[in-house]
Amino acid sequence: MTATNYIYFSDLLGTMLFAISGAMAANRRKIDIFGATFTGFVTAIGGGSLRDFCLNLRPIWVDDGNYLIAILIGVFLAAILNDQLDKFSRTLTLFDAMGIAFFTIVGLQKSLMYESSIIAAVILGMFSAVMGGVIRDTLMNETPLIFRKEIYATACLSGAILFVCLAYFGVDEGINAFISALLVFMVRILAVKYRFSLPIIGG
């Protein structure tokens, strides 16, 4: 599989995971199927669209219907498996953690592909990952995770920085992407489990 194909399919998978996350958040608020679909849609495309705008690109979902199919599959899975998934108290966190892991690395890789500086690519990777969740939480009238004490965006930045470092030392891109995405996922999950947080200024 070429690097371009890898990024593409990873982006589709991340899109589906975020659609599940958004739709499940709506389902927990007893929002109807249209509202759940809308929430899943904006959660899935929010971060990637912002990244593409910053790269002076048209958002890829506008031209590629596979992204819309991935979103609909995610919403469908959230609808038919909602009761089963909701039995696990941290399921929404699990899907969100997987989503930010994929989107961080894919956003970073795509930014580098379009000749962003390394620092800008790291930031865009983080934006790709967190902005969908910001939109989801705002729609649910909740304080976005990025503004809470929980380690969230920091997990994305850690994975993005690891990717850049491993790439510098010539690690295979596929292996690098897997390791870096795994770091994002593990940092986020461990932060939730053990309530790790960053210090508050003045607090």
Image: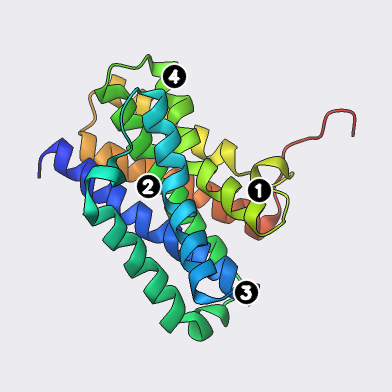
- The answer to whether residue 169 is visible is no
Residue at numbered disc 2: 102
**First reached walking from the N terminus: tag 2 or tag 4:** 2
Residue type marked 4: Ala
- Callout 2–callout 1 Cβ contact below 8 Å: no
Residue type marked 2: Phe
Query: Distance from label 3 to label 1 (Cα)?
Result: 17 Å
Residue at left offset 32%, top offset 69%: 73
- The answer to whether residue 132 is visible is yes
Q: Quadrant of the N terminus?
A: top left
Query: Distance from label 2 to label 4 (Cα)?
Result: 18 Å
Residue at numbered disc 1: 145
Q: Which mark is residue 28?
A: 3
Disc 3 element:
helix
Q: Is residue 125 above or below residue 76?
A: above
Q: Quadrant of residue 13?
A: bottom left
Residue at left offset 36%, top offset 60%: 16
Residue 122 in the image, given as x and y percentages of width and height: 44, 26
Disc 4 element:
helix
Front-lying residue, 141 or 102: 141
Task: Give the foreground label among 4 and 3.
Answer: 3
Within-10-Å neighbours for mark 1: few <14, some 14–19, many 20+: some
**First reached walking from the N terminus: tag 4 or tag 3:** 3
Residue type marked 1: Leu
